[in-house]
Image (cartoon, grey):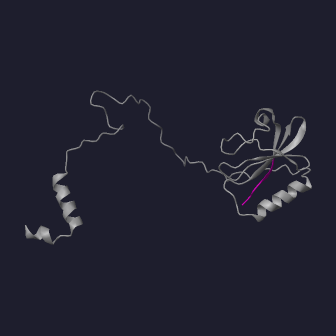
Amino acid sequence: MRSFLLLPATALGVLLCSFGCQKNVSVTTPTDTPANGTTGITSTPAPAARNTTTPVPDAPVAQFDTTARPGWLKARIEAHLAEEKQNPPIQVFRYRYKGAVVYYETSPCCDQYTNLYDQKGKLLCHPDGGLTGRGDGNCSDFNKNKTEEKLVWQDPR
């Protein structure tokens, strides 16, 4: 009995629990055969003569629409590249909205407004983002009425 007193407290606890905590537990898994019949699975896969794994190709590089990028947008892209990499990466899309070409810039993360610019680089509104996720309310119909989506740029880093 004295040998228990010389054990560290943790080892003593493990030893005592191993004697007092054991229970008879029966574990069954869905792959066990039921006690009254079969599992209901009637087909058996045929053995494969060759490797059945298909290699997954690398993700395709995004095809950017670089046609007629305005100067202000090129400068904006350069500014993003000079900043720290964002997660998720910033993207810029071109759309047609209310008959005009507009540029939509995603936000880097949570609760930040996205930006919608006209063709000359003037900020029109914030279509989404912010605390409510609904933007600033000045172009709440943007997602319903935008057309001709083209990915113009995505941060490649």
Decide if residue 115 is on the left or right side of residue 119.
Answer: left
144 in magenta: no
- Left or right of 48 in this view: 63: right
Of residue 128 and residue 19, the one placed in the foreground of this image is: 128
Residue at x 71%, y 63% (from the top left corner): 84
Classify residue 13 as left or right of residue 28. Answer: left
Picture quarter with the C terminus: bottom right
Residue at the spot 81% in from the left edge and 33% down from the top edge: 145
Nearest the viewer among 40 and 145 is 145
Counting every numbered tag in the picture gives 0
**Residue 87 appears in which quarter of the rendering?**
bottom right
Q: Position of residue 88 (x, y in %)?
A: 67, 53
- Residue range (magenta): 151-157
Q: Is residue 34 above or below residue 69?
A: above
Residue 25 found in image quarter: top left
User: Which percent across, then down, holds residue 50?
Assistant: 54, 48
Residue 120: x, y in percent?
92, 49
Residue 6 in the image: state x and y as whole percent.
15, 72
Question: Can you say which quadrant of the picture contains the N terminus?
Answer: bottom left
The quadrant in which residue 100 appears is top right
- Of residue 16 and residue 58, the one placed in the foreground of this image is 16
Q: Residue furthest bottom?
A: 6
Residue ID at (28%, 27%): 36
